[in-house]
Image: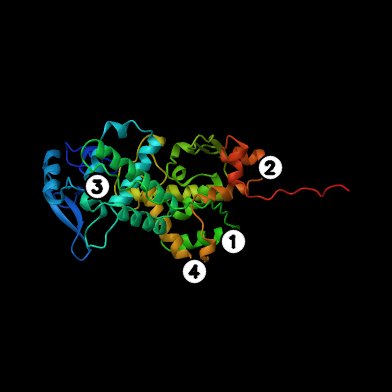
Amino acid sequence: MTRGRRRHRTKTYPPGIDPDKLPRGAYWDPSGNGHWYTAYRDSTGKQRRKRIAGRDAKMSDLHRALEEQVGTKRDSLRWVAEQFHASDQFCQLAKGTRDDYEYCRAMVTDLPTRKAGLLLGDAPLSRWDRPLVQRLVDQLTKERGPSAANHALRWLRRVWRWGANRGHTTPENPAKGIEAATERKQRRCPDVQTYNAVLEYARENGFPYLWMVMELAYLLRLRGIEVITLTDAHATEEGVEVSRRKGSRGNLTEWGPRLRTAWDAAVELRDSIIQRRKMPTPMRPEDRHLFLATRGGEPLSRSSLDSAWQRMIHGAMGTVITEEQRFSLHDLKRAGITRTKGGRQAKLDGGGHRSEQMLDVYDQEVPRVRPTEE
């Protein structure tokens, strides 16, 4: 079985259980004497739980029980993906590529099909052909956007090639020759009124951490993934010192009233989750993540943030903004850089860009110039 997202040890895990080696789909319920269970969907599509082992179960027992209950069929994309993600070839990839592939695997294999209770990853390999993959790309383009659809296509093409070379899949790759989604270079920059409207919508409609993520992405000029990897170690007396991805330079943004309010609200929400779930507070500041999942208490993942953002922004459209005013979380970095005061150098430093060419992608401010002298 594959190992899904990284587990985090809690006080309630029985002795001898390594969270990092738990089979995917095995969950611990500490109520009563405690037991292990798995989640599945019945024939009506309703989420169900089923007990698979008691408190004294060993790791081998959990793997065996899950194989018997919801075992991954060898004749499925999910099984081939599990083998690829556990292979040396996968482990040798760059961390950013591995993270992207993990995201794509969940996006593709956990996609519900028209048949109730069946996920796409569990469909037989014999069903995978070019029309199916094209429908998948078209569906993901509508639901997740063209960029996510193309990432999923590249992942599927890579997994199938790896499986074919090792005899797990057919030599003919159904992901080859597929029409990729057209990625329009939409350099959207929400105006202040649009931003504030969505910010208040997130505050008032049950999205407890999204308005904080929005403010930090905007004020610190960060990508979404950079926001959810913030920890207490990034907060200094002078401001928030951040490290960036994709080769961008880190910097320190000085404290301001809005930045302090958003940061303190995130810390308060984080601490309330820890207290409610009776979790231990990490000793080292770099281990205290600013954003935790409200249900499980683990560090907020990229996929969870993306899903919450899509639910929120779709709710905001038609109520506080129009479809044309829609913007992504990444567009907030562009808005933050555009509205940074102090000229081009201040914007270059604020966004951590290493070149003027890259700054042009984000800076949407129209330069003001004097008229030509007659």
Relative image position of residue 373 (x, y in whole percent): 86, 47
Badge 2 amino acid: Gly
Q: Is residue 186 left or right of residue 281?
A: right
User: Which mark is drawn over residue 77?
Assistant: 3
Task: Find residue 75 and report its horizontal and vertical position in percent.
Answer: 18, 47
Q: Earlier in the sequence, mark 4 or mark 1?
A: 1
Name the element at disc 2: helix
Closer to the N terminus: mark 2 or mark 3? 3
Q: Amino acid at mark 3?
A: Leu
Mark-to-mark CA distance, 4 and 1: 14 Å
Residue in the picture at 29% in, 43% down: 5
Q: Nearer the viewer, mark 2 or mark 3?
A: 3
Residue 228 falls in image quadrant = top left
Name the kind of residue labelled 1 in the image: Gln
Instruction: State the separation of the CA atoms marked 2 and 3.
Output: 51 Å
Work out how far the residue at label 3 is from the one at label 4, CA to CA, in angstroms. Answer: 40 Å
**Quarter that holds the N terminus:** top left
Q: Position of residue 104 (x, y in %)?
A: 34, 47
Q: Residue at x 38, y 42 (%)?
A: 100
Q: CA distance from mark 4 to mark 2?
A: 36 Å
For the question of whether residue 102 can be seen, the reply is no
Q: Which residue bears the numbered disc 1?
A: 193
Q: Badge 3, how many Cα within 10 Å: few under 14, some, many 20+?
A: many
Where does label 4 land, which residue? 319
Q: Are marks 3 and 4 in contact (CB under 8 Å)?
A: no
Of the two numbered discs 1 and 3 in the rendering, the one whose residue sits closer to the viewer = 3
